[in-house]
């Protein structure tokens, strides 16, 4: 039986977010942003290990306490200049531990709102697939092609278009081969690299809450999504998912983020 592993590329600089530290360490609901993705992946009983690929000179990781995820969580200080290089470097470092046919779920550190039902849905729908698959959302908005100066050039058809998210899950062997044979291509996700080899991933319908935190305004939305999830759990009489998380601090954080805008 193939085993399941997760790999979180977290070696980016967060240029579009601006700010002093990379976005994966910005505070979100009382935790560094990356904590949320780690918590969701580590909580899944089918995932054996969660590898986090950090920049070689990362000095912030060690400033946080990751003990609660031990020994499932493994930091790797081998990030590269592009996202795909971080992923490939991480895959190479773990080659003695992971089998060719094992599943590797690659998930952006910058998607803190992934929840357990979506993760389970991906694993259930792709676990038997010969290629692999990804969470994605059918495009709902009308699409405009710009002339480069913020004026509409034409309307594009959205028929058949999906917006790709993560996790994206592929067999370790196929993914490593795909990322090693790119030529001049700089893929923005794993599925694109696999496409170059003539394999086509399965699209698993997700929802927009699993969005990628990219710009400063995205922090508020992420805080609201996480806060509402935890308050719903509280209302149902269940214990909070993450120790130390409470609705009041989340609400204060939303307030703080609004003031910063
Ligand atoms: N990433 C990485 N190594 C890189 C670039 C990105 O591991 N060389 C990671 C980021 O840390 C993030 C994920 O890939 O978790 C998605 O990338 P993105 O959202 O583009 O993050 P950044 O590259 O950090 O942001 P920006 O593009 O605005 O600089
Ligand atoms: Mg980037």
Image: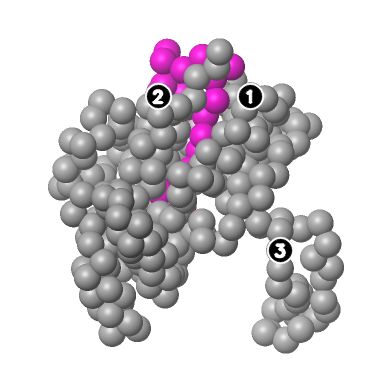
- CA gap between label 3 and label 2 equals 33 Å
Marker disc for residue 106:
none
Residue 207 in the figure: left or right of residue 6 = right
Please say whether residue 25 is visible from this viewpoint.
Answer: no
- Identify the residue at image location x=41%, y=15%: 97
Residue 48 image offset from top left, x and y in percent: 40, 24
Q: Is residue 125 visible?
A: yes
Residue 88, placed above or below residue 97: below
In the picture of the structure, the residue carrying the numbered disc 2 is 48
Magenta extent: 89-110
Q: Residue at x 21, y 37 (%)?
A: 68
Where residue 85 appears, as percent x and y from the top left, is 49, 38
Front position in the image: 235 or 167? 235
Residue matched to label 3:
139
Q: Quadrant of the N terminus?
A: top right
Instruction: Identify residue for label 1.
Output: 174
């Amino acid at each position: 039986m193939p085993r399941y592993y997760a790999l979180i590329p977290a070696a980016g600089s967060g240029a579009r977010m601006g700010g002093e530290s990379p976005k994966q360490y910005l505070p979100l609901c009382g935790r560094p942003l990356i904590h949320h993705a780690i918590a969701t992946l580590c909580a899944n009983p089918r995932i054996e290990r969660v590898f986090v690929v950090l920049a070689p000179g990362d000095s912030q990781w060690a400033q946080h306490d990751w003990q609660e995820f031990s020994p499932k969580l493994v930091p790797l200080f081998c990030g590269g200049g592009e996202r795909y290089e971080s992923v490939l470097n991480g895959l190479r470092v773990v080659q003695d531990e992971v089998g060719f046919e094992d599943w590797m779920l690659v998930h952006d550190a910058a998607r803190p709102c992934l929840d357990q039902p979506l993760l389970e849905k991906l694993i259930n729908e792709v676990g038997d697939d010969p290629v692999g698959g990804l969470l994605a959302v059918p495009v709902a908005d009308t699409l405009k092609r710009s002339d480069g100066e913020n004026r509409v050039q034409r309307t594009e058809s959205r028929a058949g278009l999906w917006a790709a998210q993560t996790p994206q899950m592929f067999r370790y062997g196929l993914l490593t081969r795909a990322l090693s044979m790119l030529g001049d291509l700089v893929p923005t996700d794993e599925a694109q690299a696999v496409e170059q080899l003539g394999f086509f991933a399965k699209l698993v319908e997700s929802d927009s809450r699993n969005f990628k935190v990219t710009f400063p305004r995205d922090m508020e939305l992420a805080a609201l999504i996480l806060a509402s999830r935890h308050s719903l759990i509280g209302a149902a009489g269940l214990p909070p998912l993450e120790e130390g998380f409470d609705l009041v601090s989340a609400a204060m954080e939303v307030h703080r983020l609004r003031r910063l805008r």
